[in-house]
Amino acid sequence: MELIDTHCHLDVDEFDDDRNEVLARCREKGIQRIVIPAIDRDGWDNLLALCARERGLYPALGLHPMFIDKHTDHDRADLEKYIESTNLVAVGEIGLDFFIKELDQVRQKNLFDKQLSIARNADLPVLLHVRKAHDDTLSAIKKARVQGGIAHAFNGSLQQAEQYIELGFKLGFGGTMTYEKASKIRKLAKELPLESIVLETDAPDMVVEGHKDERNSPEYLMDCLNALAEIRDESPEHIAEQTTKNACEVLNLPCN
């Protein structure tokens, strides 16, 4: 089986001590490719260097909504410059976070619209971070007419999921669905067409049930695969084949 982790922050400090060992264990388990989305401008160069240094790592650059107070107009301008000179698989991690009340929603929307425009002009998919803001996000991407992307850590309604799918998006499912108490997410994972689902870990965050209170890791994508197979009563091999195909399709990656 070949698996793709479509959302993992392998570039952050939490992996500095054992990044090579983590990658080795991933490859042993068939997790051959990992998409690494950026958080802020400061991390771009390190992220790109990591992806250039290691096989199977794919970069995405963007300005994360949770750090809206940190982002500047110069950062946005740099994003356009980097896209022109760098081979990216997506613009991300971008989006809207209305869960944290202290984050300025107007500034978030303005930055999100600008990054969607950059993605559309570059003909790149987007990696979305969305919390308590799916309707606003859907409205923005409809207006922007981006080519599609992934709604990372999807936690909206079935109706919202169907709207994303109609707009060319895949829906990311990860560690949350490994918890039996996460009934809403598990119900979505069962009801949505498998052709619309991709797997992710969001490591080092959103740890899987079997490793509570630990740092999450891309090697735990196997836990997500097995959870989805159990939820859908389908074989892990079939889930792996289809979700890998989905990831390749939405991110324009070569598929074996």
Image (spheres, rainbow, N blue to C red):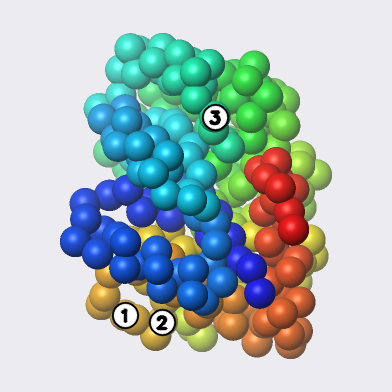
Look at mark 3 in the image and give the residue it sits on: 87
Q: CA distance from mark 3 to mark 1?
A: 35 Å
Please give the residue where the numbered disc 1 appears in the rendered image. 212
Rounded to the nearest whole Å, what is the CA distance between mark 2 and mark 1?
6 Å
Say which residue appears at 25% left-offset and 77% top-offset: 213
Amino acid type at mark 3: Asn
Q: Quadrant of residue 71?
A: top left
Q: Quadrant of the N terminus?
A: bottom right
Q: Are marks 2 and 1 in contact (CB under 8 Å)?
A: yes
Which badge, 3 or 1, comes first in the chain's sequence? 3
Counting from the top left corner in percent of width and height, residue 8 is at: 43, 55
What label does residue 150 carry, if any? none
The quadrant where residue 210 appears: bottom left
| Between marks 2 and 3 in the image, the one whose residue lies nearer the viewer | 3
Residue 138 shows in this picture: no
- Tell me whether circle 2 and circle 3 mark residues in contact (CB < 8 Å): no
Amino acid type at image mark 1: Lys
